[in-house]
Amino acid sequence: MVFHRGASLLTKLRSRAVQQPGLRNSVRWFQVQTSSEVDLHSQLKELIPQQQERLKKLRSEHGKVQLGNITVDMVIGGMRGMTGLLWETSLLDAEEGIRFRGLSIPECQKLLPAAKSGGEPLPEGLLWLLLTGKVPTKEQVDSLSKELRSRATVPDHVYKTIDALPVDAHPMTQFTTGVMALQDIPIVSELALCFELFTHVASYQLKNTLLSLLKVQSEFQKAYEKGIHKSKYWEPTYEDSLSLIAQLPIVASYVYRRMYKNGQVIPMDDSLDYGGNFAHMLGFDDPAMQELMRLYVTIHSDHEGGNVSAHTGHLVASALSDPYLSFAAALNGLAGPLHGLANQEVLLWIKSVVEECGENVSKEDLKKYVWKTLNSGKVVPGYGHGVLRNTDPRYTCQREFALKHMPEDPLFKLVSNLYEVVPPILLELGKVKNPWPNVDAHSGVLLNYYGLTEARYYTVLFGVSRAIGICAQLIWDRALGLPLERPKSVTMEWLEKHCKK
């Protein structure tokens, strides 16, 4: 593949005014000014030198400024609350929730282009925003959608690798395996045979030519082996990242159709956008479900750099592992029950409420079931968050979607009642810093309503979404030359001695 993936012709289009009067005071100028350039790669080439200089100045002028004190609680408690990562694409505020390049979720819903008037934002628009800090025009988003479709080709060996696993293996196991397989170029049998024949008789040059054909398909890996200058690391990272983002819905939908639909695969529709196509390939062509998938992918895409999946991707990539390897590692973190697997646990728990109490359970009986869960040593899934101290705005926008599209759904009504019942109980316990619902408390009920009822699969949807944020930041990690991450660790003995001083 050509290094710059055949840079497209630079077409000049008129900028579209994206500011709305009600938002002018809350949206920074930098974020809403759009370039007329349709090509995303070209925009980054303009932006990166500016941001490199900004970081250089920040470090030279303020490198010794202290950001806070580290306590023993932080060291023992999983580095909770430590300020220790640079993450440009989003910032999480404990009170108001996530902002993508400074824009709240409601602002993104109003400013980012949609597939239809008044619809949910297109994930491609958020990718553009995360990479450039600028709200794109509809023309720019359409151009990016087209580019992603052009990259959405998955080699046959990826499917064969997934098929080598048991069909009932956890969807995240199959998905992560597929992502790892994307990094490799398969050894075709004829080529392998040629290599074996020429091992003892071919010239040194021919041997090396054959070997070069057996390397990985990662553009970063190939460029690094050729000796690319570190100032250019971001370019092959960009190539890998966009290709990976484009390929993920195909791999994810293959896993779903293999597990739950007898392997009947649905091909991509060239007329659809990223989120719409993902829903289509899963087997859902209801326009409302496609809208839900656009919203889902957008709001799950990024959540600052300290969460397990984002931090894992950043950490592994800091060793100059390519985006495929880094994102596969991030997926393994996402698969844990304290992170992305929580959305699966929420729906299963809600269904257990229905099984025991019925769909029309009273609030009084709901309280009893919540206490039963807590008294058994379990948590109420979907409530609480490591950083947030208010209702997650991602929960709120999903609730608004449900009120618009499915207000009479019994499970949605149950979720609404839980919103009233659970927080007071958790506050009564006195041990919970945040008794409010997070994003996982609502997503499963929406998916279930439109027919995606297989809760074990939900974390794969989360994984596809999270690639947008992780890969966008990874490109900037390489553009800004961020170093190998290597925090200092200590022993309990060291802590004890230090505290006695």
Image: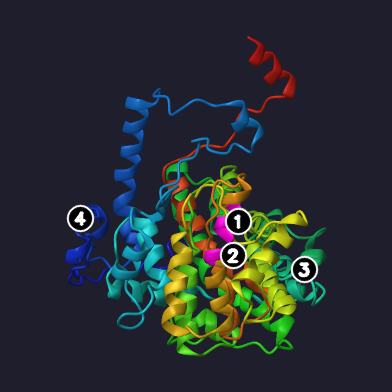
Give the residue number, with chain letter if any, for mark 3.
Answer: 192
State the CA–CA distance, disc 2 to disc 4.
Answer: 34 Å
Give the residue number, with chain letter if any, for mark 4.
Answer: 25
Q: Is disc 4 surrounded by few (<14), some (14 to 19) or many (20+) residues within 10 Å?
A: few
Q: Position of residue 165 (x, y in %)?
A: 80, 72
Viewer-side residue, 64 vs 403: 403
Query: Which residue is painted at 29% across and 53% down in the image?
Result: 46
Residue 423 magenta-drawn?
yes
Counting residues from the N terminus, which is met first, the one under dot 4 or under dot 3? Answer: 4
Q: Position of residue 195 (x, y in %)?
A: 77, 65
Front disc: 4 or 3: 4
Amino acid tagged 1 = Ile
Counting residues from the N terminus, which is met first, the one under dot 2 or under dot 3? Answer: 3
Give the residue number, with chain letter if any, for mark 1.
Answer: 425
Q: Position of residue 411 (x, y in %)?
A: 59, 79
Majority secondary structure of magenta residues = helix
Can see residue 51?
Answer: yes
Q: Quadrant of residue 205?
A: bottom right
Q: Secondary structure at mark 1?
A: helix
Q: Position of residue 345 (x, y in %)?
A: 68, 66
Q: Secondary structure at mark 2?
A: helix
Give the residue number, with chain letter if any, for mark 2.
Answer: 463
State the CA–CA distance, disc 1 to disc 2.
Answer: 32 Å
Counting residues from the N terminus, which is met first, the one under dot 2 or under dot 4? Answer: 4
State the CA–CA distance, disc 4 to disc 3.
Answer: 63 Å
